[in-house]
DNA sequence: TGTTAGTTAGCATATTATGTCAACACGGGG
DNA sequence: CCCCGTGTTGACATAATATGCTAACTAACA
């Protein structure tokens, strides 16, 4: 496991102590599982994967833990155009390429984009703390399939 | 109805003729309904609303028509962080403010942001045609509620 | 107006998400 | 090290959301 993941687990530990809530094995397992992948799994995919570590974990708990981790800022709920909630272990600023045909989504790192200035003041009353750019386009696979 | 909406209906008419597919009353009704609102309704909210015009329309058809309209580029599937697909009648370039607490989403018009340059070439093989910026923050209502 | 291709309505079913509560585990104090 | 209390988990039921299927229907065109 990368050092980054180890740091994140320590952060989970710290947050739990600060908030006075238990650091359960399930919380650790779900976070670890998510950190080990670089895609954007659905809650059910996380449930599948986490069973390697915690065979007795319930689906309900995975959903609950994911919400908790999002609230702690340890993972992100990805803004995905499909109907299913997806989660992302990467919480540093990054952007997304979204396929307008198959809804596939991949990360895009681009330091150029990170300098966009946040809106001045509180637009529409929102207290903005971060942003992410989504580029809409067609993925290679869909381009090929569409030519047919 | 605004001229913009009228134009979009004409566009639907044109696209249907070009593709040789019928311009059904259901397609028109769903598009009209979506153009009349400025929020980001879910498919079911569209279903509710469209019944004023087409009381006999089925839920299944609304889902299908929404997909069709997205494929035609007449509406957008909004990249919403929640679990439910949402749709947007606005297809010109605009951005979103997303509440990290209640997932509320509102539009943000900002000419400054429209000048972001698309990535050079085809990043990860994607053929990028548009983009949208999402600002994450907390809406006024949630800020108040959290203070309690 | 009649023909035909494509769509729709209405159902069933699949998929995804949440409510509830008894049993259980974590964390702190003795 | 063990026990106790708070908060979490597991397993169910249920709700919410989305899709598959086919007979009946409608738009488009001659």
Image (cartoon, coloured by chain):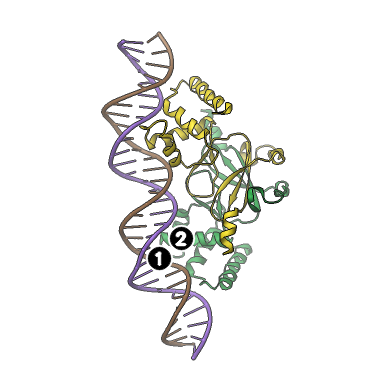
Chain colours: A green, B yellow, C purple, D brown
Vertical placement of residue A21 versus A67, above or below: below
In this rendering, position of residue B136 left or right of residue B41: right
| Identity of the residue drawn at 54% across and 46% down | B80
In this rendering, position of residue B30 left or right of residue A94: left
Q: Residue A56 bears which disc, if any?
A: 1
Residue B29: give x, y in percent of width and height. Answer: 45, 29
| Quarter of the figure with residue B59 | top left
For the residues bearing labels 2 and 1, Cβ distance under 8 angstroms:
no
Which chain does tag 1 point to? A
Residue A95: give x, y in percent of width and height. Answer: 63, 47
Disc 1 packing (10 Å; few <14; some 14–19; many ≥20): few
Name the one closer to the observer, D1 or B141: B141
Q: Secondary structure at mark 2?
A: helix
Do the dots labelled 2 and 1 sit on one chain?
Answer: yes
The CA distance from mark 2 to mark 1 is: 11 Å
- On the question of residue B132 being in view, the answer is yes
Q: Secondary structure at mark 1?
A: loop
Between label 2 and label 1, give the one nearer the viewer.
Answer: 2
| Quarter of the figure with residue A37 | bottom right
| Quarter of the figure with residue B47 | top left
Residue linked to disc 2: A62
Vertical placement of residue B9 versus D5, above or below: above
Residue B34: give x, y in percent of width and height. Answer: 50, 35
Name the one closer to the observer, A62 or B61: B61
| Identity of the residue drawn at 70% across and 50% down | A118
Which chain does tag 2 point to? A
- On the question of residue A94 being in view, the answer is no
Residue A119: give x, y in percent of width and height. Answer: 70, 48
Disc 2 packing (10 Å; few <14; some 14–19; many ≥20): many
């Amino acid at each position: 496991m990368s050092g980054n993941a180890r740091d994140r687990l320590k952060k989970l530990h710290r947050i739990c102590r600060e908030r006075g809530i238990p650091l359960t094995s399930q919380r650790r397992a779900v976070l670890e599982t998510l950190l080990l992948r670089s895609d954007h799994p659905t809650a059910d995919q996380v449930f599948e994967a986490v069973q390697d570590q915690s065979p007795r974990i319930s689906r309900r708990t995975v959903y609950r833990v994911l919400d908790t981790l999002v609230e702690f800022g340890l993972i992100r709920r990805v803004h995905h155009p499909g109907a299913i909630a997806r989660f992302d272990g990467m919480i540093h600023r990054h952007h997304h390429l979204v396929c307008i045909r198959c809804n596939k989504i991949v990360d895009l790192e681009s330091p150029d984009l990170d300098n966009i200035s946040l809106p001045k003041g509180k637009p529409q009353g929102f207290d903005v703390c971060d942003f992410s750019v989504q580029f809409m386009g067609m993925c290679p696979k869909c381009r090929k399939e569409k030519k047919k």
